[in-house]
Amino acid sequence: MRFSNRMNKVQKSFVREILKVTENKEVISFAGGLPNPRFFPVNEIAEASNMVLHECGESVLQYSTTEGYRPLREFIANRYYKDLGITADNIIITNGSQQALDLIGKILIDAGDHIIIEKPGYLGAIQAFSIFEPAFNAVSLGKDGIYIEELKQVIEKNNPKLFYAVTNFQNPTGITYSSENRKKLAEIMKETETILIDDNPYGELRFDNEPIESMVSILGTKMISLGSFSKVFAPAMRLGWICANDEIIDKLVITKQASDLHTNNFSQRVLYQYLLSNSLDEHIAHICKAYKEQKDCMLAWLDQELPEGVEVTRPKGGMFLWVTLPERTSSIKLFNIATSKNVAFVPGVPFYTNCKDINTLRMNFTNSSFEDIEKGVKLFACSLKEIL
Ligand SMILES: Cc1ncc(COP(=O)(O)O)c(C=O)c1O
């Protein structure tokens, strides 16, 4: 078959490959990035679906506008961008934030264009952007955020089109950019043509009460802000959004029209009805309480079981923590041993753009019971001892 050249540049999603291993019910999986299904509001979604079908009838099953259902866009503008001069006109509903990455790639990236991603960065973004054949510049992430000097140098040298970041409870590391780091980042972004894209699916999964100023509250529509209902509602609904200035929204509308005409209208209407009849804040508070307990449990077992020389991030929200093994320890070798003992995680490799093996790995804590966390961490530590 004569496939396009660009398909040679895209890797199969490593996580999908790993999920094949974890399909085995015996395997305790810390690999996936799945929200805990215990919190999917099944009954509320059933009620909301019934209501929109019975009260709004055929209109919810009809084609709709590319930008998305206006009341939902108004809700988003109000909840997430209040007092920033941002309105529903700045919001376009997408088929999850994953589609946002594809659309942004389409409107901004030509083959060979420089773009910046975090190192390590969200593998779904690396995959989505790879289709457009950019030159990746990976800038290191430290425990307080992005390395400012490295970022400045890359911007000065290569004038990249965009910087893709996950500033809250990052995937894969769980790291959150500090206030100081955000301010410095904002200063840089104000002075450059490189546009910041802050992807924020985890921002509301916060375990403490210390909200941090969002990048969009500093930069407004000088940047692009992405959001998603996957982690706070249900991923199968495939509902996310892009918040951007009018010029960018216009281009996004054209490319979304070409791509899928519009996001599932029924999903949007059901979500909106759910938001009218229920408190999203209360729902999120339940999720956060449970995820915090799971995170604490995993950290406690890791602290107890892991040998000296292994570092683990201590996230204040989100779904992941990041483990750094002693130098030159292969996370792929560890993965093979661990899966033979029926425990899985994601080796660091797919979170980098050019990497064959590395001493880092990602663990998800939201989708396992306390018993499985204990058992899985013990098996993980046991596997590690075999290769140290
Ligand atoms: C940082 C980040 N962005 C985007 C996505 C895609 O989410 P969705 O398309 O379900 O909104 C994910 C999913 O895990 C993610 O971690």
Image: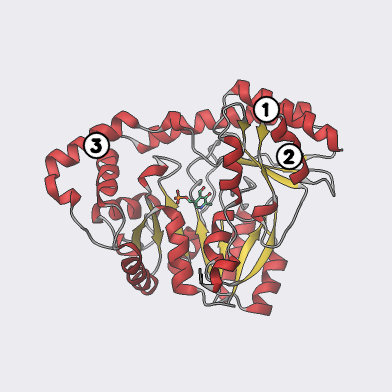
Q: Amino acid at mark 2?
A: Asn
**3 or 37: nearer the viewer:** 3
Which label is found at residue 114? none
Marks 1 and 3: in contact by CB < 8 Å?
no
Among the two numbered marks 3 and 1 on one chain, the one whose residue lies closer to the N terminus: 3
Q: Residue at x 24, y 32 (%)?
A: 47
In the displayed structure, would residue 242 be above or below residue 245?
A: above
The quadrant holding residue 70 is bottom left
Residue 345 rendering spot, x and y as whole percentages: 66, 39
Residue matched to label 3: 48
> Would residue 235 appear left or right of 383 to someone viewing this image?
left
Q: Alpha carbon of mark 2 to alpha carbon of mark 1: how far?
A: 15 Å
Residue matched to label 2: 336
**185 or 259: nearer the viewer:** 259
> Would residue 305 appear left or right of 234 to someone viewing this image?
right
Residue matched to label 1: 376
Residue 110 rendering spot, x and y as whole percentages: 52, 77
